[in-house]
Amino acid sequence: MELGGGCCSPVLDALHLELKRRIHLGDGPSGEGGGSIQFSIPSDSVSLYQFLVKENCIYSMRNFIVKPVGNGLRVASHNFKLRFFVRTFVSMLSTDDFQFLRFRFTPYLEINGMCSNNDIFLIDRVGQVVGKEDPEDIITKAGQSSKRMRLYLEDEEKNKMKCTLFGDFVAEAFIILEKENIEKNIEPLVMVAQLFKPHVYLSDFCIQPSFYGSRVFFNPAFREVE
């Protein structure tokens, strides 16, 4: 599906969409060719869809509003976004009817460019864990005690990227890494970072969780990771 530059909040008739994450994030549908576009559900309509629209399912959708993305958080590169309203209709489809794409992995160089220009994109990244630093205690901006841990991910092109984890993500990663160490597992440890934020500090760039639904998976049995 293509949305032209002259489009100004029309109500369109039909689209197939794919949920990657929570509906309040506005994660995007995947159209022909594998593109994605983010959507949002306004607060006054959440009650209509919170039990109808589920994560990792595929739907047919009609009657929605198309708007320019504008400023703010972005989970897709498309210049337009979709918005539900009370007349929006969704119907679940079989995965046999439409290709399901759980992630859209962002190339290394593209992430580097995002770090240099803005900090509003949320991206998916996959890599083998090739290094780690010990967890450390930190105090958040809200004055709460937490943990921070840095991992190093390497992709198939041998590009290495730092991944900084906080809070519960540290505990989850530490358990997995300790288990790998105890069992002396010779298989590579693969990590998927979903909806992470590119970040740069003192010319050093990395990815880190966002407040908006980030998630990590270790050695997941997903088709996109095989």
Image (spheres, grey):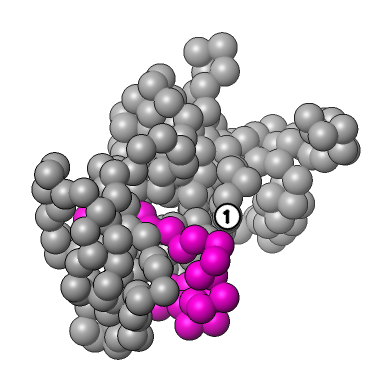
Task: Tell me the residue that label 1 is attached to.
Answer: 213
The front one of 112 and 114 is 114
Question: x and y percent of residue 6 in the render?
Answer: 12, 44
| Image: 95 above or below 176 | below
Locate the C terminus by quadrant: bottom left
Question: x and y percent of residue 38 in the render?
Answer: 36, 55
Question: x and y percent of residue 220 in the render?
Answer: 50, 65
| Image: 31 above or below 143 | below
Q: What residue is shown at x 46% (from left), y 63% (from top)?
A: 41
Q: What residue is shown at x 40% (from left), y 20% (from top)?
A: 116
- Asked whether, in this view, residue 109 is left or right of residue 45, the answer is left
Q: Which of the 4 image quadrants contains residue 47?
A: bottom right
Q: Is residue 44 visible?
A: yes
Dot 1: what SS?
Answer: loop
Q: Which of the 4 image quadrants contains residue 202?
A: top right
The front one of 40 and 44 is 44
The front one of 224 and 66 is 66
Q: Amino acid at mark 1?
A: Gly
Q: What residue is shown at x 29% (from left), y 44% (from top)?
A: 68
- Asked whether, in this view, residue 129 is left or right of residue 176, the answer is left
Q: Residues within 10 Å of mark 1 (few under 14, many from 20)?
A: some
Locate the N terminus by quadrant: bottom left
Magenta span of residues: 35-58
